[in-house]
Image (tube, grey):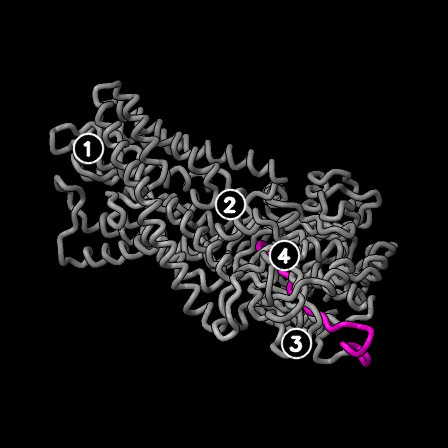
Amino acid sequence: MTTSPADPPEGVGRSGRGLRLLAVTACPTGIAHTYMAAEKLSQAAESLGHVMKVETQGSIGAENVLSDNDVKEADGIIVAADKDVDPARFVGKRLLVVGVAEGIRHPEELIERVRSAPVYGGSGDASGGGTGAPTARSGGSGGGKERSLAYKALMNGVSYMIPFVVVGGLLLALSLAVGGEPTPKGLVIPEGSFWAHVNDIGTIGFQLMVPILSGYIAYAIGDRPALVPGMIGGWIANTGELYDSKAGAGFIGAIVTGFLAGYLVMWIKKVRVPRFVRPIMPIIVIPIVATAALGLFFIYVLGKPIAWVFTHLTDWLSGMTGTSAIALGAVLGLMIAFDMGGPVNKTAFLFGAGLIASGNQTVMGMCAAAIPVMPLGQGLATLIRRRLYSEQERETGMAALFMGLFGISEGAIPFAAARPAQVIPANMLGGAVAGAVAGMAGGTDAVPHGGPIVAVLGAVGGVPMFFVAVAVGSVVTALATVALVNVSDRGKGGAAGARVAAAPEPVLAGVGAAVAPVPPTTGATGATAATAAMAEAGAMVAGAGAMADGTGASPAGAGATSAGVSSAGAASAEEPVVLSGHLTRETVRVRLAATEKEAAIREMAELAARSGKVTDVEELVRVALAREAQGTTGLGEEIAIPHAKTDAVTAPVVGFARSAAGVDWDSLDGTRAKLVFMISVPEAAAGDEHLRILALLSRKLMDPDFRARLQGAPDESAVLRVLGEVG
């Protein structure tokens, strides 16, 4: 139970032995670790004689939010999070920043360390900004390493960029599909028409996506003062005319300017200035100095090499026209796929487009085949191995497929920006294959545009082989991406798919194991999942079927009547309703036979099937195992909560089993799982009920006495009576 500094026990505070402490816990992809860390910190504080209030920032939003008075009275603040938590409100307080796993594993140690943690916002290293990384480094936390900060900053930029890519790309594709007309200059929409205005709006979205990427990378590193230099730097990077280049630096240039802006702002923040200047530093001095310095640096220093690359690549390609068509096609495909709008891509595209007027349409045919391969391949990858991607990445993949059909290669940029080491080589391989096949077939393209749309509109010669080239290249890209991402994730301990992608808060791979990606709830009020504070008070709001069941009374809604039915017949009427009737006597087993994780999940799925709510056991097992591949659901303290969101179940069902020897579940603390809960919900219930059940279980299971009684319950009825305390 968390307590608030607003109502402390007598004798606690600066004048007493105990401390007033605050904490913020957050995990980017789920809910269980957020609440586990909160409970562990609260319990440790209570046992040490301190008072602690914990704000949780889970998938259902911030709860138990720290007030200004809380911060004012606090002696120290612990941030245990694997995503960015804005530290601006903690200026002048001792602040310790660590990963969420540290809050679960070592809560007592963190409470001891925060007593001597540096004061945030003062002089020296503690006066960092942005994500709190300087505090984490100076405090010696496990969660504030430079690599982690850079990764989170990149993901932050990608997540904000995605809506601009999708909206801009789809509007461009729609306007070209409906209003475009093939001409010698490409697909042209009649000026002043309705579809021309739609195209203009889409173009604005594309113009903004690169500055947005740069700006929010910078923001994640240097906080608000870095946003303006990051965005303006990204715009400069994407506008080649400013540094005498026919093509801008594209998304790669935006990544460079984003990091430069963020770290430049962090450095400026450390400069000692007179006291009277400090109030205007973040809103005037830092943005102006950083923006001017970064912009001029890019124009006069970085821009020259970009222009040089563009010029010399064009000259090099001109010398290749007499070589093998297959080799030329492969080279053009590699270049088209490399930076999707940057100088290398534009060099190949303009080279092919420039030869159309001279009567050589085969070079543009090679480029046209490679142009759609990146978005089509990345979209296909999200369909081939869905478990490797978050829900939002899969949605972005569908949009990328659509953009690829219309030759909009930028649809693959979010994937390349998020996983450059895996996606860019896969894109280049597929682009090279597509270009080589098109070169071998001798296909032509009479307009400076690419993708299947130009073939449909009659601008391509050798249509069948053109489609073969596009299809083969896309499949190669998809398979190469899946293979490279699999290899990368195995090297990182299997944290595949732990990303944020489309909400403002990115989906990231956190410290330790990841928790299941959960779609954000919609709306700001009653449609959200149950809040932890209400759960502690004995009430729970649960989506459309809102109910209060903190007393253990039967809720109004489906499933309540089945709570007390056993496999042998009607059970005792005294057995409580557990988790709104989702966990019943049929789904309880006091002895789990399996000794391995996969076998245990299969046994739990078969146990859930006894409820009559499972239509496909094999599919349920497959989804649960796919979830485990993204990151372990072993939470530590001998607990595992595997879960699956699938329409293989007709209604939410929760199973529970005990293992005497324990199952190796790759738990955070290395313990073997002896208490195993399996949550299975239909896709439609994933947003509310899934989160509600996880929140209830993860909080209650942090009580050692509760776990001991659950371990010692002799039979199913006794187990149900103990679990009845959950709600």
- The mark lying in front, picked from 3 and 2, is 3
Question: Could you tell me which residue is drawn at 32 percent across and 52 percent down?
Answer: 236
Give the residue type that dot 4 points to. Answer: Ala
Q: Which residue is mark 4?
A: 136
Question: Is 716 situated above or below 225?
Answer: above
Where disc 2 sits, the SS reads loop
Cα–Cα span, label 1 and label 4: 56 Å
Q: Quadrant of the C terminus?
A: bottom right
Residue 590 seen in render: yes
Bounds of the magenta span? 9-33
The alpha-carbon separation of the residues under discs 4 and 2 comes to 29 Å
Q: Is residue 418 above or below residue 224?
A: above
Query: Which residue does the numbered mark 2 point to in the structure image?
Result: 389
C-alpha separation, residue under disc 1 versus residue under disc 3: 67 Å
Q: Determine if the magenta segment contains residue 462.
A: no
Residue drawn at (60%, 51%), measured in percent from left and top? 516
Disc nearer the start of the sequence (1/4): 4
Q: Amino acid at mark 2?
A: Tyr
Instruction: Please indicate whether residue 411 sits to the left or right of residue 481 in the image.
Output: left
Q: Position of residue 171 (x, y in %)?
A: 28, 54
* Residue 32 appears in view: no
